[in-house]
Amino acid sequence: MTVAQYIQSSSIPSYLSKDNLGPWETYLQQVEDVTPWLDKELHPWIETLRRPKRILIVDVPIKLDNGTVSHYEGYRVQHNLSRGPGKGGIRYHPDVTLSEVMALSAWMSVKNAVVNVPYGGAKGGVRVNPKQLSMGELERLTRRYASEINILLGPDKDIPAPDVNTNEQVMAWIMDTYSMNQGRTSTGVVTGKPVSLGGSLGRHDATGRGVFVTARSAANKINIPIKDARVVIQGFGNVGEAAARIFVQNGAKVIAVQDETGSIYNPNGLDVAALRQHRAVHKSFKDFPGVEKIDNAQFWQLPCEFLIPAAVEGQITRDNAKTISARVVVEGANGPTTPEADRILQERGSLIVPDVLANAGGVTVSYFEWVQDISSFFWSEDEINARLERIMTEAFEGVWEVAQAKKLPLRTAAYVVACKRILAARALRGLYP
Ligand code: NAD
């Protein structure tokens, strides 16, 4: 099987409806959209955006607790390294595909350039349902995967971080595996680590905080007060839960949330702290008191000021987009809106804060973590949050300015800002040899 055939055969994760583009095709469409807005001198380099620099496909065999051996497929893709080492998370999910990881790595190239942190884009994933593994099996899977992609990793080469179904513990195992192979402790090889191992204060909430900061910047532009604003969130994990909590701290009402187990609604606002505790114990929203259970269609139809998709790709499609009436859609997840849905939302008057801007808070504090590890000098949480706010606000203002000047949606404007930075670096470096 050729690589092209392989990519095609594995292109669409099962949670995407068949009539929508896959993530890589969505990304290619976004490159098409930005091309007319890029300076002519940069055009010869645009093809580099369509071609990942490196793709590594690995077999990850592990011994299960019952003594049998199971094999999993893993990937690490470095999309573009023109502006610095690869940076991007690692996802464990039964629907992970190569084309999805390619798209996620490309979105990291764009995101890192939007907030102007000195990284290229990379992403990794293993096709596995980690919820079916014991802790021991999860550790063996992580260590074997880290060993297999070890040839790409390093604090100045490629620096993973958490993504869907991976967390601080997984990052600690990757850091330890890499360090064992190097014969020295290398904390800067991953970010999103526990604070006791060189992790950064503020990293856990950073993506959700960035979602809030960009949502507030957008709201200021179109005169929506945060106080009592109605917020609807899909996904109650690292990003969704932190965003919910920070919105509530700032006076908004989170009226509905959805996760893999269902959707719950309370027009007066959910008790987010209690919901977090309930979910930690029961692993679902089931039996959470004082809420109404609603179905998927009702969830997307809810009138609200802010709709925050913070789960997986392709959740806002041409079907549910027609029912969405949110004033602002803030993309906490990567690639949650298909290109067709994007157009429908714009026609319906929603302002979309795109993923490459809205969820860049995570990689921004990852950058702070990496700088702190390299310099062995650690900052206070207040300092980190203040720097995060400044970078996110400046990035939003830069994108807003381009959008106003060229009359573009924020997504295309963000791609203009980012692709100019990536391609200018690429052009300056020139071709080797
Ligand atoms: P997570 O694993 O912590 O949480 C994911 C949440 O989404 C869970 O509540 C899960 O139940 C829910 N979910 C998954 N599939 C769903 C479906 N089909 N329908 C409804 N709910 C579903 O993951 P996370 O780290 O919060 O990441 C969420 C998204 O944000 C992903 O797209 C990820 O790439 C993106 N992101 C994460 C970070 C980060 O720092 N963690 C940074 C930038 C972007």
Image (spheres, rainbow, N blue to C red):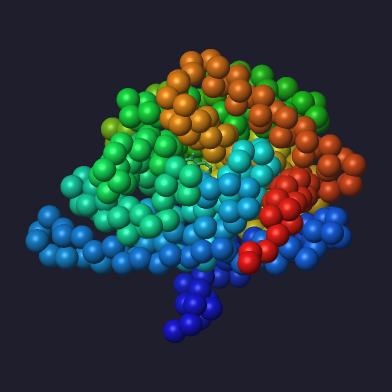
- Along the line of sight, the residue nearer the viewer: 359 or 284: 359
Q: Where is residue 433 in the image (x, y as percent from the top left)?
A: 63, 67
Residue 100 seen from this side: no
Quadrant location of residue 95? bottom left
- Along the line of sight, the residue nearer the viewer: 316 or 3: 3
Residue 56 seen from this side: yes
| Residue shown at 17% from the left, 65% from the top | 69
Residue 94 versus residue 173 in the image, above or below: below
Q: Residue furthest bottom?
A: 1
Q: Position of residue 242 (x, y in %)?
A: 49, 30
| Residue shown at 52% from the left, 57% from the top | 78
Q: In this view, does 377 lie to the left or right of 61?
A: right
Q: Which residue lies furthest to the left in this view?
A: 67
Q: Position of residue 145 (x, y in %)?
A: 31, 56
Q: Position of residue 320 (x, y in %)?
A: 63, 55
| Residue shown at 59% from the left, 56% from the top | 80
